[in-house]
Image (cartoon, rainbow, N blue to C red):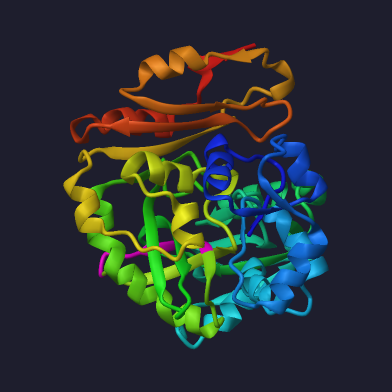
Amino acid sequence: MILIDHPFVSDFLIKTIKENNFKIVTTSQAKELIKDDSLNWISEKEAKETIINNPKTLVYTNSENSISWVFENLKETKLPHQIQFFKDKLIFRELIKDLFPDFFFKTIELEEIQNLKVNDSDFPFVIKPAIGFFSIGVHIVNNLSDWEAAKKELNYENLKSMYPKNVMDASIFIIEEYIEGEEFAIDCYFDNNGNAVVLSILHHKFSSGSDVSDRMYSTSKNIIETYRKPIEAFLNPIGKKADLKNFPIHIEIRIDASGKITPIEVNPLRFGGWCTTADLTWHAYGINSYEYFLNNKKPDWEEIFNNRKNKIYSIIILNNNSGIESAEISSFDYNLLEQDLENCLELRKLDIKKDPVFGFVFSETSLSNEKELDEMLVSDLRRYIIV
């Protein structure tokens, strides 16, 4: 069963729903986004009764916003409780603290941030909303200068959000120790026996040590083969803590030089937002993550890599880091951007005046041409912006 909500649903997900005759809930938001009446639409009442009467019903949503529907309609199930484990970063840290006993964290209210005193011994640390999305309000603080800069941005006016409060709530923040290592994002699900099944692993690349943006995520054969088994072994105890079965997640982690894995956050009941990571997995490996979860399938990675090109597959998120206000921008040269890339597999155009980004690029890059990804990672995108 699938819940669809704003801000975006991809053509690939709609096609998947249609071809598999997956049940889709007839919410007003879903009908606004999908005009195809031939899909297997079911009423909200039927969806609610089905899930309550059969707790093993598999539920997938494309958007954080659908969490509101789950909280309102499925109070009799354990889904709201499981979602809360992960959406509230404090509850998540409390849930797994015996698995990571040395990890430091504490909470602070937004109004207390301006008067919080920090010492040199406190650095580095990360401050972020306890309930957040899309890196909004996230700061890595390495010194007093960083802290002063962060405080200037951490106020209500800057943090007003287009998302519902159970998706993005800037009233409570969590301060936690900075996790060393490389960052990865994983799409996976826990099967009907509670075992973790990894569907994709993406390296979240940053332009610097203080960068917290979502500009680029890349996956490759080498990344999957290196990290899949350790990540599945790492995920299983967390799944048992939250009693996860038939449950999809998108989890962000860091892996340090010794191979130690530490979780950053978990996004429940979905894969990467805006239908990004799951759609890239299809481009990269021919794995339809939506089908794999809803049909309880597991990837045969040996077979997949026997039949796929050894390339780097990336999501490039065209966030506006140009310093140019969106109101001043008349257009974005997507054609020039495509010309600058070796192989643009898909380009999703968005309106920067309405959406938080110019769009998303799905790209294929030869191993010998990784410099083009490095250039996109640090680009301010002014080359493509027409004012």
First to last magenta residue range? 249-258
| In front of the other: 239 or 125 | 239
The residue most toward the bottom is 98
Q: Main secondary structure of the magenta part?
A: strand
Image-quadrant location for residue 57: bottom right
Asked whether the viewer can see residue 11, the reply is yes
**Residue found at x 81% / y 51%:** 156
Magenta span includes 250: yes
* Horizontal and vertical percent position of residue 20: 53, 50
- How many marks can you see? 0
| In front of the other: 298 or 138 | 298
**Residue found at x 34% / y 44%:** 286
* Horizontal and vertical percent position of residue 41: 71, 50
* Horizontal and vertical percent position of residue 375: 36, 28
Image-quadrant location for residue 80: bottom right
Asked whether the viewer can see residue 251, the reply is no
**Residue found at x 58% / y 38%:** 10
Magenta span includes 384: no
Quadrant in the picture for the N terminus: bottom right
